[in-house]
């Protein structure tokens, strides 16, 4: 009796990941972006005027004196979870105790010798001012301070949050619009395809950056407005790629089989065609995130971006540019952060394009 071996088939995305790992530049860029994401998420634990862990004698408003172990810095990180954070605060007393008031509350209660605290690597908040104004690189302030005495390193760390949010949320909006319109245009064809294609061509005629500038002149400089406007103007490339892929996929046998089994048009589009058309759109989305970060930084530098006091890379660059003649120390860190983030997103997108391109899919596999 003979045994026949059956080779286990691998899916498209698993094969793509296997090929992606062979690219050293792509893996370096991906690891750097994961590091940036970790910095953005754990920013309150990396730069804060509150300790990560402390044991401090504290008199509550009711007059009760406690000497418990508290986690104020960790608490700020957990605040980012809309559900888990409040649940943990109510369940674990160390997280719910000791609400510091603004303006150096911890320093007010802390007594050296009696209390102890483990501070973050950068013991300054992004909005905390000091008397060390326009100070260069030092052991106390690693990347110096700005004209208000705010620590540049702390603002750079929190600026990562702004850049990641703008990049991912704005391109999430763009992807939602582009994928839906592109899939509908490619599947239905006819006048639907013609109408959506004309809308795409109209958007392509406008220079996106100047269009964003014109629109932002009518709105407040808030991060939410930046994300929405970038998302509403960056969907064109995603829609074109999705349309072309759906035009190809709708002629395949499995699409005809889905129709024969009674699946409606929108079920065929969003259940069968769109998941298989994501690969080229993912490349465009990755490049779009890099572009969104660059646009937000440019808008903030011009004064049309986020609020002036918000710690963002563009605002740091703008503040450094105004003091470039006397104190240029703020410009290199902000430029390096913008350059590396944009470069790594582009490297990831370029590697993804090589991995999923049918013309190169067979090489080096």
Image (cartoon, helix red, strand yellow):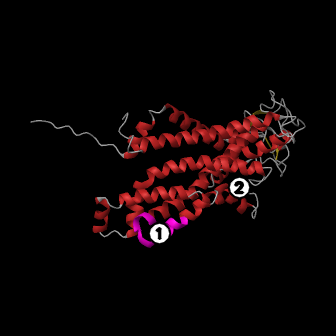
Q: Residues within 10 Å of mark 2 (few under 14, many from 20)?
A: some
Q: Is residue 79 visible?
A: no
- Magenta-colored span: 184-199
Given this view, does label 1 or label 2 mark the residue nearer the observer? 1
Assign the magenta stretch its main secondary structure.
helix
Which mark, by number, is residue 128? Answer: none
> How many numbered marks appear?
2
Between 181 and 223, the one nearer to me in the picture: 181
Q: Is residue 196 above or below residue 21?
A: below
Q: Position of residue 199 (x, y in %)?
A: 54, 66
Rendered residue at 55%/58% (across/down): 236
Q: Position of residue 275 (x, y in %)?
A: 42, 56
- Name the outermost residue toward the left: 1
In the image, is residue 189 part of the stretch drawn in magenta?
Answer: yes
Of callouts 1 and 2, the N-terminal one: 1
In the image, is residue 173 part of the stretch drawn in magenta?
Answer: no
Residue at the disc numbered 1: 194
- Looking at the rendered structure, the secondary structure element under dot 1 is helix
- Name the outermost residue toward the right: 131
| Image quadrant in which you'd find residue 246 | bottom left
- Name the outermost residue toward the front: 205
Rendered residue at 76%/57% (across/down): 221
Q: Residues within 10 Å of mark 1 (few under 14, many from 20)?
A: few
Between 296 and 76, the one nearer to me in the picture: 296
* Image quadrant containing the N terminus: top left
Residue at the disc numbered 2: 223
């Amino acid at each position: 009796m003979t045994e026949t071996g059956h080779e286990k088939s691998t899916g498209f995305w698993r094969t793509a990941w296997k090929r992606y790992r062979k690219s050293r530049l792509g893996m370096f860029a991906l690891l750097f972006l994961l590091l940036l994401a970790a910095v953005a998420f754990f920013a309150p634990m990396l730069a804060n005027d509150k300790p990560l862990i402390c044991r401090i004698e504290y008199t509550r408003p009711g007059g009760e004196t406690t000497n418990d172990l508290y986690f104020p810095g960790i608490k700020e990180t957990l605040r980012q979870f809309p559900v888990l954070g409040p649940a943990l605060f109510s369940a674990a007393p160390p997280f719910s105790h000791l609400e510091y008031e603004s303006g150096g509350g911890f320093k007010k209660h802390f007594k050296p010798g009696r209390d102890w605290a483990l501070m973050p690597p950068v013991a300054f908040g992004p909005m905390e001012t000091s008397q060390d104004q326009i100070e260069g690189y030092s052991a106390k302030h690693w990347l110096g301070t700005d004209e208000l005495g705010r620590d540049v390193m702390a603002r750079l760390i929190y600026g990562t949050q702004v850049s990641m949010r703008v990049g991912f949320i704005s391109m999430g909006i763009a992807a939602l619009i582009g994928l839906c319109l592109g899939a509908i245009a490619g599947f239905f064809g006819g006048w639907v395809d013609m109408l959506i294609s004309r809308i795409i061509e109209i958007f392509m005629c406008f220079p996106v950056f100047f269009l964003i500038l014109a629109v932002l002149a009518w709105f407040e400089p808030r991060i939410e407005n930046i994300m929405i406007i970038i998302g509403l103007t960056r969907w064109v490339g995603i829609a074109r790629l999705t349309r072309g892929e759906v035009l190809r996929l709708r002629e395949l046998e499995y699409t005809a089989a889905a129709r024969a089994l009674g699946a409606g048009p929108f079920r065929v589009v969003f259940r069968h065609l769109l998941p298989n058309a994501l690969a080229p759109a993912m490349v465009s989305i990755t490049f779009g995130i890099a572009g969104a970060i660059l646009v937000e930084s440019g808008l903030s530098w011009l004064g049309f971006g986020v609020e002036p006091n918000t710690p963002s890379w563009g605002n740091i660059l703008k503040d450094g540019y105004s003091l470039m003649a006397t104190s240029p120390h703020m410009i290199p860190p902000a430029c390096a952060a913008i350059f590396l983030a944009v470069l790594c997103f582009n490297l990831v997108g370029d590697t993804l394009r090589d991995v999923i391109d049918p013309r190169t899919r067979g090489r080096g596999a």
